Image (spheres, coloured by chain):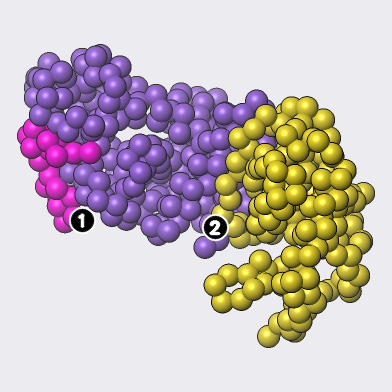
Amino acid sequence: MQWTRKDLLSLYDLSAEEIEFILDTAAEFKKVSERRVKKVPALRGKTVVNLFVEPSTRTRVSFELAEQRLSADIVNMQAQSSSLLKGETLLDTVRNIEALQVDLVVMRHSAPGAQAFIARNLKCGVVNAGDGAHSHPTQALLDIFTMREKKGRVAGLNVAIIGDILHSRVARSNIWGLLKLGAKVTIGGPATLVPREFEDIGVRVCHNLREAVEKADVVNLLRIQHERQTAGFFPSIGEYARFFGINHDTLKYMKPDALIMHPGPINRGVELTGDVADGEQSVILEQVTNGLAIRMAVLYLVAGCVKK
Amino acid sequence: MTLRKQLFAAPEMDDAISRMASSIANAFPGENTVCALVGIHQLGVPLAERLRDALANLTGRTPEFGKLDISMYRDDIGNRNPLPLIRETEIAFDVNDRIIILVDDVLSSGRTIRAALDALTDYGRPRMIRLAVLVDRGEPEYPIRADFVGFNLSLPADRKVSVSFGDGNSSGGIYEVDWKK
């Protein structure tokens, strides 16, 4: 097949073949970062705007480094410094950006669908770096890339996603991507944060940790954002950690070769204990490395399809 | 319908590859251990494999071997969509101070070779880079010339040269393709 999309908005939109195309492309871009010269001229002369209307550090840094390694020119815009605060509409902001002859916009926004709206209205390419609780395609792609690299396949894998599924764009993107590639997905966590409705799309729902992770080949732990949304969804952080945290004892009933993943930043002692985060089964830092390769691949592919 | 006319059959192609291998062996006597072949995807790779085997037969030593995809080094990304899948680049040896022979099936505009030179030099600083092609069309758009050539062909610009190394069904050959028809 050939890549034909100028935007990456959600894994829901992509076919299994397209997802694999991105993963295969990323495998070649991963090698670039392992070379003496960690840079290729693929996006030389192209301009990328990183528009982060919702704060982000690690995703923004990963995108920025990916853009630099592709030789693109970069402009960073953040909500705090943008004219959105002065009452300009989002569409006007991005139209102004496009008038500067920009080729790609990488965007994070708290409103689900903001990037899809922008993509429909602009000629330049749009990459979704997270929209509300809806979608975070590059995070899911790097998670799936890591699983494929470590386990040699995705189809047939048992993947457990544990934590705050309700508010998580990472979970939703992982679920769509994994189901398309033929993995079996289980979600686990407190009943208030893990809705039964997910069963309708073919996901197993567990409210007991052992049941959720016992047969898993991969356990992906989501950050408990206790500083915001989760207030009131469970009694205390300590109680969450006791019922749903991964520690030395939970590892005993899991598969010995199960991968421990986490999109970061980790709360040591909450989603997992320090020894598990630093242990042999943890691939958390490899996820970060792979994120760079995925973002290089995505930017390269969409940039190739932006019409002049 | 495209018109496809065979210019050379498989045995002629095999002879040409043997001649190219001899020329390479003669050009670098005793240096096969420091000399390496790098095939450019797609069809430079099977050609480089054949040259490697021919050189091994001739000299008793197998040269180092690599594969190169030049997609990330093209100067026309965004002008020619959609994008094909990037093939595997594999250069497992140290390119520093080595004699490298870049291998491609057809030298046409020279733009692929321009990109390949940029890609290769990002891996290190070779002592020398030479170019081997099965077909040289003789009218490059960039100042690039081949050092080892199987066939020199002069064809109208709207004709394409297509090389096939054969598969289970055919033995391969070199074809002229009229892509307007």
Chain rendered yellow: B
**Along the horizontal axis of the image, is A233 left or right of B52?**
left
Q: Can residue A83 be seen in this view?
A: no
- Which amino acid does the dot numbered 1 rest on? Ile
Give the residue at mark 1.
A201
Considering the numbered disc 2 on the image, is that residue within a helix, a strand or a loop? loop
**From the viewer's perspective, is residue A41 above or below residue B178?**
above
Element marked by disc 1: helix
Q: State the residue in front, A22 or A97.
A: A22
Q: Do marks 2 and 1 share a chain?
A: yes
Give residue B123's position: percent from left, percent from top.
69, 32
> Dot 2 corresponds to which residue?
A3
Out of B138 and B58, give the one closest to the viewer: B58
Q: Are marks 2 and 1 in contact (CB under 8 Å)?
A: no
Chain rendered purple? A
Residue at the image point whose x is 55% and y is 25% from the top:
A81
Instruction: Identify the residue at horizontal 72%, vertical 72% (top origin).
Output: B10
The alpha-carbon separation of the residues under discs 2 and 1 comes to 27 Å
In this rendered view, identify the residue nearer to me: B105 or A200. B105
Indicate whether residue A206 is drawn in magenta: yes
Q: What stretch is highlighted in magenta?
A: A188-217
Residue type, label 2 = Trp
Residue A14 in the image: state x and y as whole percent: 41, 57
Looking at the image, tell me whether mark 2 or mark 1 is earlier in sequence order: 2
Labelled disc at residue B10: none
Kindly identify the residue that appears in the image at 89 percent across and 65 percent down.
B152
